[in-house]
Amino acid sequence: PALPSGALALEIKDLTFGYNPDEPVLQQLSLQLAAGRVLGILGRTGSGKTTLARLLLRLYDIQQGEILLGGVPLHQTRLSELRHHIGMVTQDVQLFHATVRDNLTYFNRAINDEQILKVLSEVGLTGWYNSLPTGLDTILGSDGEGLSAGEAQLLAFTRVFLSNPGLIIMDEASSRLDPATEQLIERAVDTLLSERTGIIIAHRLGTIQRADDILIIENGRALEYGARAQL
Ligand code: ATP
């Protein structure tokens, strides 16, 4: 079955998963995120946060339990469609040796230059864009060579905006950016999350305040879960 368009509801039922089946990394995890809500996930290093994000993208098959996205069991979705509906922003921005345009659209010619420039301006990259020698045709170095960490992050946001997914997963950088960049990113996150479902692997106080629900994971189990206002 096809995934519905727009913000996607997420339901996880009694999920248990281990890279090695004898060593579960996530255990009996359940949650329900209504379309348009934002879930903040907190947990120490190694608690299973990234693993959960990978399972949503179906990088691994789950061994026990069920994940439903937009009401559709994850294993029944087409992989290409699923990855089209989920936007992932991580600290490690995957930029490649190609034009700015291709980096931002993944070669999707249905996205035109006007749309790209609009989003670049929305995330606050117009100044950066104006400094490029040949605009969207400028070739970027591999691994974002020549870009600041903040610029690379904002380009990652631009890319996700342009793909217009119904669920955004964000693994926030814990490292400090300068206050001006930090503010641009905070604003971009707000715009990105409006009218979308969001999961934020949170490292900053600001984002936890933005979350509607909070899940605290400890050793792969939900230690606390519920509406932020009630925790
Ligand atoms: P961090 O905050 O440091 O990113 P995390 O909460 O995201 O940590 P995960 O990356 O999900 O934690 O890791 C959870 C557990 O799974 C850890 O014990 C880790 O060593 C293990 N793990 C992660 N990836 C793999 C893998 N590809 N193969 C085997 N074990 C893995």
Image: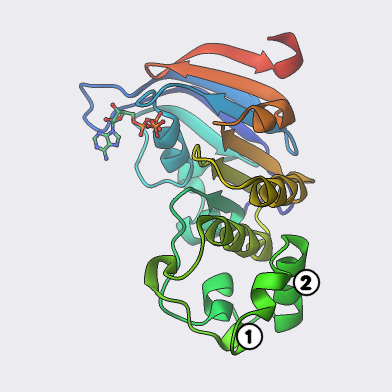
**Residue 128 vs residue 97: left or right?**
right
Alpha carbon distance from label 1 to label 2: 14 Å
The tag earlier along the polypeptide, 1 or 2, is 2
Task: Give, as a three-letter code, the residue at label 2.
Answer: Lys
Q: Residue at x 34, y 26 (%)?
A: 46
The disc placed on residue 135 is 1
Does residue 150 appear in the picture of this structure? yes
**Residue 138 vs residue 112: left or right?**
left
Q: Circle 2 is placed at which residue position?
A: 118
**Residue 96 vs residue 223: left or right?**
left
Residue nearer the viewer, 20 or 187: 187
Q: Position of residue 118 (x, y in %)?
A: 77, 71
Query: Quarter of the image holding residue 220?
Result: top left
Q: How many marks?
A: 2
Disc 1 residue lies near ligand 1 with CB under 8 A: no
Q: Quadrant of ligand 1?
A: top left
Disc 1, SS: helix
Q: Quadrant of the C terminus?
A: top right
Residue nearer the viewer, 58 or 115: 115
Disc 2, SS: helix
Q: Residues within 10 Å of mark 2 (few under 14, many from 20)?
A: few
Q: Position of residue 207 (x, y in %)?
A: 66, 33
Q: Position of residue 160 (x, y in %)?
A: 61, 59
Does residue 1 appear in the picture of this structure? no
Task: Give, as a three-letter code, the residue at label 1.
Answer: Gly
- 14 relative to 175, above or below: above
